[in-house]
Amino acid sequence: MYGQPVNEAPAVQLVFEHRHWHEYRQEWRVDHSECSAVVVGGAPLTVLTAAHCLRDVSLDQASGLPVVRVARASHPLFLKARLRQAIFPEFDKVRGNLIDDLAVLVFDMSLPDSIAVAPVLLDQPAHSVLLCGYGHGAADSSPADLGCANKEVHAGTDTFAEFVPDAYAALDPVFYARYQVQFESKASVVSALEALLAVNRLNEMGSYDPALPMPTLGDSGGPWLEDIGEGRFGVVGITSFVESFYGSSPQWPFFRQSSAPLADFVYAAYGIRLDSMRARKLFNAARLKGADIRVYRRGWKDEGVYASPASTEIRR
């Protein structure tokens, strides 16, 4: 996430192991991928991330669970966590409907009360939220710190012009049309666009600005946070996928003004809403397996933080 370092946000970096058969060498190759995640409960430690992060993940021979570890976090205690349960849809289901891109991971430790968690916010998202993640640009090394940035929230149903204004069409109509088709094709793999949140890369003048922060490689699963008071955050969504330019137009000035690799020219980023019925169904299934997924709604009495160890949400 191209943003400011924030050390206290309830997020962690996950590293997943993947094993691939190398046909030419006739041997297994092991590589790793990185994603971000948000801590939504501490008894036991429970995080949410993007389900696509677990595509082709290695499975532990003894437990049958995905091979995943916490690599970075705000507190060293997280690094000792070991996976106990993983609840997520298979990638074929996610590929068929992107709003299923959500996973729940439960670890074998409980957090002390001094370590903050981010309950799932069951309210309409605010006008702007804090996006966080451990992502990095295509030409950069993996960051040591969590990066966060305040972004204005849009609906998943917003038109292409909300992300790349019509003014660019006049400069290069063919180039504009190409990416408009790419953008609109996502509707075929999202059956409920209202289940998505979105952010763009437009500045106050309504122009695309590659210097503005946007989710990128490694930010998948990172939280979209909202301040709920007294230094606490609630989470309204997690980063799922982005739309990027994979070519440049000499008629569009920002390509000439930035030396960033094309992979970093993201113009739209989407987050999975956590207040949807699809998300709640997954949460209930995870609670039956011991997940601690806390929820919050403005106006609730007491502290407003709830724990949900069973299939129904009960007050903590």
Image (spheres, rainbow, N blue to C red):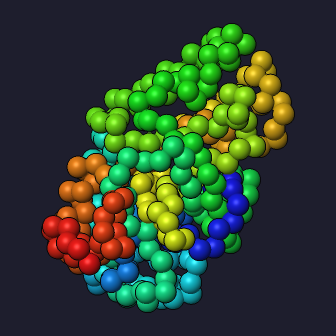
User: For the N terminus, which image quadrant?
Assistant: bottom right
Q: Is residue 244 above or below residue 63?
A: above
Seen at 43% across and 89% down, the residue is 112
Picture coordinates of residue 82 (x, y %)? 40, 84
Residue 289 vertical placement versus 126 (above, below): below
- The residue at the point 56 percent across, 77 percent down is 73
Q: In the image shown, does 163 or 89 lie closer to the viewer?
A: 163
> Does the rendering let one see residue 53?
no
Quarter holding the C terminus is bottom left
Q: Nearer the viewer, residue 106 or 313?
A: 313
Name the residue located 34 percent from the left edge and 69 percent from the top edge. 304
The answer to whether 232 is drawn above or below residue 50 in the figure is below
Closest to the observer: 186 or 224? 224
Q: Return the x and y of residue 51 as percentages of the image width and height.
A: 37, 57
Q: Residue at x 80, y 25 (%)?
A: 253
x%, y% of residue 5?
69, 66
Q: Where's residue 46, x and y in %? A: 36, 74
298 left or right of 160 in image: left
Asked whether, in this view, residue 230 is left or right of residue 248, the answer is left
Instruction: Say which quarter of the image contains residue 315.
Output: bottom left
Does the rendering let one see residue 251? yes
Q: Quadrant of residue 19?
A: bottom left
Q: How many marks?
A: 0
